[in-house]
Amino acid sequence: MPKTKATIAPVYLRFKAFVIDMFIIFMPILYITTYLIMDGKNDFQNSQIAILMCNIAFCLLLSLFFAISAQSPGYRAQGIYLINLATGRKVGFIHAILRYICFAIAGFSVVGLLLCFFRKDRLNLHDILTKSAPVCKKNI
């Protein structure tokens, strides 16, 4: 029986997982907020609090997925797991929230999100700061 080893997930798989998560988790949150809670598109666009609450809801749901199974729906579709680099196990709920906050802050500086193209280990700034990594299983 072959042994499995975890390797850092390729950037294109992580991007595809992110897009899937945006459509499966974030879009329904935005839709429900815009059309069921608020009075439509114009009210939603004029309310920074509603936009912030949608982002917080997305953060909490994504962190819950990572804390329970180490995979979000997008990660599951791409065969990726999120692990803590210090322990080699899945990240905790608070750790996942901190990772999302670092991801949001890194998004303001494009360098934080493009850092993976300049590093040998292919980790982004939010992965380095939180000592976590998206990994794939590899048979050896």
Image (cartoon, grey):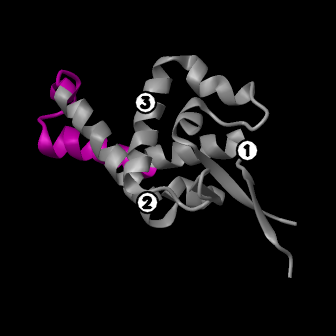
Q: Which residue is mark 3?
A: 104
Most frequent secondary structure within the magenta stretch: helix
Q: In the image, is 6 to the left or to the right of 79?
A: right
Label at residue 59:
none
Q: In the image, is 45 to the left or to the right of 1?
A: left
Amino acid marked by disc 3 = Ala
The percent position of residue 5, horizontal first and vertical second, equals: 78, 63
Tag 2, which secondary structure? helix
Farthest residue, direction bottom: 1
Total number of numbered discs in the rendering? 3
Task: Decide which of tag 1 and tag 2 comes sooner along the chain.
Answer: 1
**Label 3: few (<14), some or many (≥20) within 10 Å?**
some
Distance, label 3 to label 1, CA atoms, is 21 Å
Q: Against 60, is 49 above or below?
A: above
Distance, label 1 to label 2, CA atoms, is 22 Å
Between disc 1 and disc 2, the foreground one is 2
* CB under 8 Å between discs 2 and 3: no
Task: Point out the stretch of residues depicted in magenta.
Answer: 24-48
Q: Name the one closer to the observer, 132 or 29.
A: 132
The percent position of residue 41, horizontal first and vertical second, equals: 22, 30
Label at residue 67:
2
Quadrant, the N terminus: bottom right
Label at residue 10:
1
Q: In the image, is 119 to the left or to the right of 139?
A: left
**Which residue is depicted at the point 86% across and 76% down?**
2
**Which residue is depicted at the point 35% across and 53% down?**
61
Amino acid marked by disc 1 = Pro
